[in-house]
């Protein structure tokens, strides 16, 4: 009887697998065309994943969010039927391994997460996601007994549909493989970035974008042992898979190094059998913490990038330099093979993966045990909000005397912590990520890197930072708390006054201007009714705002909505300083702000500006297109912003010069500053390097040219500048500012105009890589300056203060450039 029951169960199991394989439609059967014959719009991809989840007990689908353009974001869980029934147990057991949850764990299921299409025009991988789902459920059930596969079929649906819709509208039928054909050359801005034109593969740690914020919530719920980020690169590049290139961050374990190599060898086995070209250990390093491979690595996973030739130039087929045609079908096959190979290795090594994953969260060997942050409460709350997105613990503590490294002086000294300090301990499950984000200087094993080399959060947020080898014990229920302001109406008020020293103060100013208030700012400190007010303080006087209905109620409501304190005063006569009616209380006009976009401008920097105005400052922005520049009526705009990369021709520069002279304010960011260097009518001069690189290259071996060029390179390094905070551009800042320098561009100090922020004599980088020859050019060079021309002015911002929206302390500079100049 028992024997018959066993065979009945076995037969039922076999019948179920066979039934699933027979009844679940393949992507081609569901869509009505073969994968690779055309690009699939995002909604059809979603439809297939929904269909598959409804027709297989091995799949569960979860919607985790929506994009800016209201496209849904999903992950699909694929495993054995039993594991799908026990997803909650598997999830909780995995978090117990990390220490995030307490208690014992019993399940031994490894988790591999496959992320597709983070760059919208690298579009083959979403097609692969459908094929991988189908293959796992129908042919790889044995692997799923001890493995849970999580598939995010499209990280960036907005970018993907931008590319796919353009391609489907543009392509020939049949497709034209000539790489010069229109279908292989996307127009600006291309499909790579998301709605706000951000690179989502640089946003994992900074979480500025809605897609990232929603993904982190579900990622941190699972914490996989393996994560693969699928990409595409230039059309003539062979396939890339791990192991990665140096530098590796020092928190990466020997196991993480070794197992990515094992996976790479398994990938190579299949690629060798098919005769497909590939490379490893080049270009793609593991340092910058905000990638789709490094972020998971710092969270304990084997994080890897896979790169297939194609991208926005790939189309359905494109002729390569070797005169073969790379088709979308080829690209799908390559990504499908590496993805399946990775799942195979995860399943075969599940027990070892799980054991080593648990070991990763032992933080016993950390040098710095406590990071102490001190400064403006709102800045610290902003930092705490970022940590909360990553579920990294922070707390406040009673005073404690200890020895600590001072980020500003770069010396170790004795300090006394105070109750208002924010403490971040590395003795927590995500302690290695804490180290990566807070360490004063990242150790480089190789100076040839793929991205910036400095990002330490105390510098980025404008806070005083200390790193101590002494552990400050975590205190439960001891969180940094905001001060809740509840302003009240004062009908007798002569004026309302608000501080101005942090970016959220600029948000208040923007809201007041939009509401029609006439707002003034103080050019000097003053004392009134027992309170001291710093220069830059905002003043709204009732007498010049008579057109505002319900003046008192409206201003109080705006301030309360932003939780900003505003003080009602009964007189305009001050005790010290200038009276409120003085000309030293400058009027801030409601600004009409425009920005150039389109061909010739940096997609990413335009996106940073657009995102800044719409989601942070929440102030109107007029987006102008460069192709219409000669027909624009610039005189109607108070402020015009030139994003990075914009290169004005002679005619355009004349129009810009006329705009400035006729009362316009022009803000030039990053490389667009060069438009005005060494030009007639402008005092800006580019600094000339002491040595010529081309001459140097001629006296070194050819195979050393790349490293020789690094001497003239700055790759995202932090420098300390001197600030003239008597100028309105610098209101709200102390007399120094840490800037993230992204290039070796350097300009002499302005002989005519104001050098608001500059790099003084003997300047050196505080953190990150800077080439020895490039460093020679930075002392006595301009960072932010104002040059007056006719009735207007040009504001030079040599370093981009809005870079990737994570350099928080630069945002007030940009707001000041818009409002206070």
Image (tube, rainbow, N blue to C red):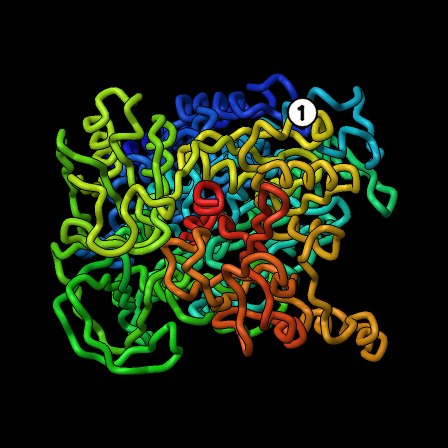
In the displayed structure, does residue 335 sit left or right of residue 813? right
Q: Quadrant of residue 317?
A: top right
In the displayed structure, does residue 201 sit left or right of residue 375? right
How far across and how far down the image is residue 689, in percent?
Answer: 72, 71
Label 1: which residue? 166
Seen in the picture, residue 172 relative to 747 is either above or below; the reply is above
How far across and how far down the image is residue 533, in percent?
Answer: 25, 53
Q: Quadrant of residue 393?
A: bottom left
Which residue appears at 22% of the width and 30% of the height? 557
As rendered, which of 174 and 187 lies closer to the eye?
187
Report helix, strand or loop for mark 1: helix
Seen in the picture, residue 286 relative to 238 is either above or below; the reply is below
Which residue appears at 33% of the width and 52% of the height? 501
As rendered, which of 221 and 532 lies closer to the eye?
532
Seen in the picture, residue 647 relative to 635 is either above or below; the reply is below
Tell how many labels: 1
How far across and how far down the image is residue 470, in percent?
Answer: 23, 77
Which residue appears at 23% of the width and 26% of the height? 551
As rendered, which of 271 and 563 lies closer to the eye?
563
Q: Quadrant of residue 452?
A: bottom right
Identity of the residue furthest to the top in this view: 32
Do we see residue 363 in this rendering?
yes
Seen in the picture, residue 356 relative to 614 is either above or below; the reply is below
Neighbours of disc 1 within 10 Å: few (<14), some (14-19), many (20+):
some
As rendered, which of 743 and 340 lies closer to the eye?
743
In the rendered image, which quarter contains the N terminus? top left
Do we see residue 335 in this rendering?
no
Which residue appears at 21% of the width and 43% of the height? 565
In the displayed structure, does residue 756 sit left or right of residue 538? right
How far across and how far down the image is residue 327, in percent?
Answer: 75, 35
């Amino acid at each position: 009887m028992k024997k018959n029951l066993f065979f009945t169960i076995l037969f039922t199991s076999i019948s179920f697998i066979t039934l699933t394989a027979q009844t679940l439609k393949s992507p081609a059967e569901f869509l009505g065309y073969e994968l690779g014959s055309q690009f699939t719009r995002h909604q059809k991809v979603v439809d297939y994943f929904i269909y598959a989840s409804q027709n297989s007990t091995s799949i569960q689908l979860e919607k985790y969010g929506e994009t800016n353009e209201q496209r849904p974001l999903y992950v699909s869980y694929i495993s054995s039927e039993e594991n799908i029934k026990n997803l909650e147990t598997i999830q909780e057991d995995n978090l117990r391994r990390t220490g995030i949850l307490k208690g014992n764990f019993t399940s031994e299921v490894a988790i591999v997460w496959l992320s597709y299409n983070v760059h919208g025009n690298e579009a083959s991988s979403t097609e692969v996601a459908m094929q991988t789902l189908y293959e796992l459920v129908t042919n790889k059930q044995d692997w799923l007994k001890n493995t849970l596969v999580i598939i995010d079929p499209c990280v960036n649906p907005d970018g993907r549909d931008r590319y796919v819709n353009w391609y489907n509208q543009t392509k020939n039928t049949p497709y034209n493989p000539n790489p010069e054909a229109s279908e292989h050359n996307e127009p600006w801005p291309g499909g790579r970035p998301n709605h706000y034109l951000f690179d989502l593969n640089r946003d994992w740690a900074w979480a500025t974008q809605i897609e990232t914020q929603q993904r982190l919530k579900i990622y941190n719920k699972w914490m996989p042992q393996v994560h693969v980020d699928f990409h595409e690169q230039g059309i003539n590049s062979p396939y890339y898979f791990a192991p990665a290139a140096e530098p590796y961050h020092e928190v990466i374990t020997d196991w993480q190094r070794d197992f990515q190599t094992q996976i790479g060898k398994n990938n190579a086995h299949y690629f060798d059998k098919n005769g497909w070209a590939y490379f490893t250990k080049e270009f793609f390093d593991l340092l910058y913490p905000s990638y789709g491979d490094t972020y998971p690595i710092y969270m304990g996973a084997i994080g890897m990038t896979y790169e297939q030739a194609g991208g926005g130039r790939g189309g359905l087929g494109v002729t390569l330099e070797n005169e073969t045609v790379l088709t979308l079908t080829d690209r799908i096959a390559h990504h499908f093979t590496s993805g399946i190979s990775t799942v195979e290795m995860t399943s075969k090594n599940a027990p070892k993966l799980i054991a080593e994953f648990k070991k990763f969260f032992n933080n016993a060997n950390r040098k710095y045990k406590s990071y102490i942050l001190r400064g403006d409460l709102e800045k610290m709350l902003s930092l705490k909000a970022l940590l909360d997105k990553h579920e990294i613990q922070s707390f406040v503590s009673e005073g404690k005397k200890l020895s600590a490294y001072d980020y500003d002086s770069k010396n170790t000294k004795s300090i006394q912590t105070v109750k208002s300090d924010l403490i971040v301990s590395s003795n927590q499950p995500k302690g290695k990520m804490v180290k990566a984000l807070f360490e004063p200087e990242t150790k480089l094993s190789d100076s040839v890197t793929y991205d910036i080399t400095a990002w330490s959060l105390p510098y980025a947020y404008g806070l005083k930072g200390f790193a101590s080898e002494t552990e400050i014990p975590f205190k439960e229920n001891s969180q940094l708390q905001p001060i809740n302001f509840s302003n009240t109406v004062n009908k007798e008020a002569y004026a309302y006054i608000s501080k101005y020293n942090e970016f959220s103060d600029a948000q208040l100013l923007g809201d007041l201007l939009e509401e029609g208030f006439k707002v003034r700012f103080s050019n000097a400190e003053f004392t009134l009714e027992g309170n001291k007010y710093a220069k830059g303080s905002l003043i709204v006087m009732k007498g010049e705002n008579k057109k505002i209905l319900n003046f008192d109620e409206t201003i109080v409501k705006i301030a309360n909505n932003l939780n900003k304190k505003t003080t009602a005063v009964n007189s305009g006569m001050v005790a010290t300083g200038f009276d409120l009616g003085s000309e030293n209380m400058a009027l801030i006009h409601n600004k009409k702000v425009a920005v150039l976009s389109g061909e010739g401008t940096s997609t990413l920097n335009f996106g940073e500006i657009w995102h800044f105005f719409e989601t942070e400052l929440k102030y109107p922005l007029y987006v102008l297109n460069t192709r219409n520049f000669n027909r624009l009526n610039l005189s109607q705009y108070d402020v015009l912003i030139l994003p990075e990369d914009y290169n004005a021709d002679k005619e355009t520069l004349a129009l810009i010069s006329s705009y400035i002279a006729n009362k316009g304010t022009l803000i030039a960011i990053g490389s667009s500053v060069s438009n005005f260097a060494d030009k007639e009518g402008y005092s800006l001069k580019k600094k000339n390097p002491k040595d010529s690189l081309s001459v140097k290259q001629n006296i070194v071996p050819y195979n050393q040219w790349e490293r020789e060029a690094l001497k003239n390179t700055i790759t995202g390094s932090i420098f300390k500048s001197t600030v003239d905070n008597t100028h309105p551009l610098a209101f709200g800042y102390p007399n120094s500012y840490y800037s993230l320098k992204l290039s070796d561009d350097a300009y002499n100090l302005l002989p005519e105009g104001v050098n608001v922020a500059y790099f003084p004599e003997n300047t050196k980088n505080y953190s990150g890589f800077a080439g020895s020859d490039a460093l020679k050019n930075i002392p006595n060079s301009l960072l932010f300056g104002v040059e007056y021309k006719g009735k207007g002015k040009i504001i030079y911002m040599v370093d981009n203060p809005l870079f990737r929206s994570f350099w928080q302390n630069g945002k007030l500079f940009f707001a000041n450039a818009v409002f206070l100049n």
